[in-house]
Image: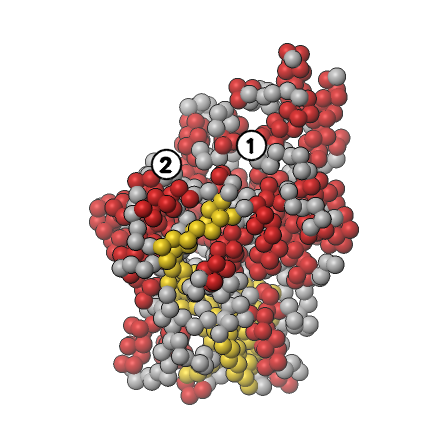
Amino acid sequence: MESNIKDDLLRYVYDNSFTFDGELNDVPFDEPLIEMGLLDSSGIIELMSFIERKWNIEISGEDLTVGNIGSVNQIAEFIEQKLSKN
Amino acid sequence: MCGIAGTYIIDTGKCDINAELTTKLIIERLTHRGPENCNVKSKPSWSFAISRLSIVGLNCKNNVFTAAEGKITYVVNGEIFNYKELRRLLIGKGYVFRSECDSEVIGFLYEEFGVEFLHMLNGQFAIAIIDEIEEKLLLIRDRFGIVPLYYYYDGKKCYFSSEICGYNELVDVEKKFNYKALDQLFTFWTTIGKYTFIRNIYQVQPAHFVEIGPFGIKETKYYNLNLCEDNIDHDLTFEKAKEKLAYLLREAVKIRLESSDVEVGTYLSGGVDSSIITKICESLKKGGLRTFSLSFSDELFDERRYQEDLMRQSSSINKIINIEYKDIFGNFENAVKNAGQPIFRTAIVPLYILSRYVKESGIKVVLTGEGADEVFWGYDIFRELKVRKFWGKNPSSTIRPLLFKKLYSQFPQFDKQYHQFISSFYSKTLSCEDKDFYSHLVRWENNSSIKAVLSKETKAVLGKDSCVEEYRASLPKQFRKYSDLSKCQFVEMDTLLQGYLLSSQGDRMSFANSVESRIPFLDHNVVEFAATLPPEYKLNSLRDKEILREAFKELLPTSIYSRAKHAYQAPETTAFLRYAKGSYVEHLLSPEVTKEVGIFDERRVGNLLRIALDTERDVKTLSTTTNMAFVQVLSTHIFYSNFIKKLL
């Protein structure tokens, strides 16, 4: 389950980040996406919208922390936690 | 204002071009700039043409003037606002005027003072002079780059034109796409220096003149704004400064109203700057002022409330043009075509629509609030610089970055906890050690990251050359004597103001519909005075344009006086989402077109198109980089199709 989430997130970054200059295999798992410049701060909203649609979960303002929305691994973990509570 | 065009052949024995015919081909493309009458004057070695929008001296029918017994011929695009005073001076010296036109002073001034006369002008202008005594062509632009002028020069001949589109019919001017300009757009949001998007066509830079003759070509900067710290008048009290600013700005508006034989209106956004200009106009005109505003159906961009606040205290008649997504989508192609270069934002489009309405209302001249945010430090980038500097002194502070909340409060995405991400983003910029570009390097690096959409071939053409380093090498010597905030002002004026706001978004959008915009905040007396003000008079803590707000407090509704800076922008990709399918957007972003043009990476353009065609998407969720990538790629393909090679 978790690896699929990660794959979907990697694919999302690959297809939707117009600042990512590499191939699908090059999308990093552990680097914070905003600090790396792969997402801009307004891109968080775009990503949240994608996550809500894709996994049918609701994200509140309180969920938006640098800890939750950091690297692909951190985001995947955050989604896992949300799904387990549903 | 007008459109001007010309041909200059350096040695007719070595060049078989028909000067008059070539000049006519250029001027015919510029009729939108001057739809009322066209004059051409030619000799075998040169030909000048002007297509005129009559504003001063309405009865003047021939605007290719001569001086020095016919040895000096000249055309002027723009306005010389202090022409009455200069005319009196010249009459006193025995010169005889043949018209009431403001531009006639230019030839006599040149005859009397040489190029030194440029320092005597208060105006917005582009001038071409054939000097048959010294055997040269002179091309001149105003101090801040309000009026455009482009040239092509190959060592044997020169063609000049008010706009890039003037070269469309000239088959001997090869139209090669300038990748260097693209690199600049994807860094600075505009081209820098003399570059344009066509490789061998250049702009005369603001505050420069170009001389062309048998000696070759020579470019000279004739004016430098002094932003050095030793130019600041620390003895000037805030009260005295307010009084002087109120006087200078009123004079700047007055001279721009008086230098017109036709009705003058204003653009009113609802911000501090355009509200001040509108209120000064009202007081000078004593009723009957017509103003023009934009509103947006998308509330994120709408400022109608403030426009209405001002109108409640006003004698003017305001017309508000409302912009919907379909208006942006439907007018984008033509707006880019008129801009004559690719762009990074859709904000030009509403102004293109607005000038059409202004023209239909029978108005040829409008005053705008442009320039105040650069001169009086109104933009977020000045405040952002201050916050970063403050935070940088104590990088471990968790309180200091909270100041970013004050900067980005107009955007809903910065509500709630988003400031965490802003802080996280800016934390990496604190260690920036670039003393020249501390203010701008973060923006430029962000912009540059979108170069990921360029094709491998384009990246190979660009190589490792850095346009930032090229720009650094062009900085004037005194730049290093400026404070960080003054450096920020210089860079804003040198890049975005002249290269985008005054040109793509300013002159080109108003003249697309034969409307001239005049800019009181860029009166050189106002700009030079602002440069002498102590910094805190402009940016007081994080309150922008302090002195402007205070000097004109009595004229403004409280809501506008105390209003935080609202950057004028328009809906970006969201405006295209419901309309892209089957339209020019789908065509221009198709794999076939992307492959044919070859500038961008096919997979990434495919992703942009997928986003544009996704009708299920929540229209408010697109990121800044997605929007910029979309607008830059689409507008580059529109430019390519109109100026390089038609994309069928």
Q: Is residue B84 left or right of residue B405?
A: left
Q: Is residue B99 left or right of residue B240?
A: right
Q: Which mark is residue A41?
A: 1
Which residue is painted at 54% across and 84% down in the image?
A: B42
Residue B637 percent location from the top left of the image: 67, 54
Residue B344 in sight here: no
Q: Is residue B350 left or right of residue B614?
A: left
Which residue is painted at 66% across and 26% down in the image?
A: A53
Q: Which residue is mark 2?
A: B542
Assess disc 2: are there few (<14), some (14-19) or many (≥20) residues with their C-alpha within 10 Å of its C-alpha: some
What is the quadrant of residue B213 in the picture? bottom right
What is the quadrant of residue B484 in the picture? top left
Assess disc 1: are there few (<14), some (14-19) or many (≥20) residues with their C-alpha within 10 Å of its C-alpha: many
Residue A61 percent location from the top left of the image: 53, 22
Q: Secondary structure at mark 2?
A: loop
Residue B189 percent location from the top left of the image: 55, 49
Q: CA distance from mark 1 to mark 2?
A: 22 Å
Q: Label 2 amino acid? A: Leu
Residue B243 percent location from the top left of the image: 23, 51
Provide the chain ID for the residue under circle 1.
A
Q: Nearer the viewer, residue B405 or B536?
A: B405
Q: Label 1 amino acid? A: Ser
Q: Is residue B44 left or right of residue B463?
A: left
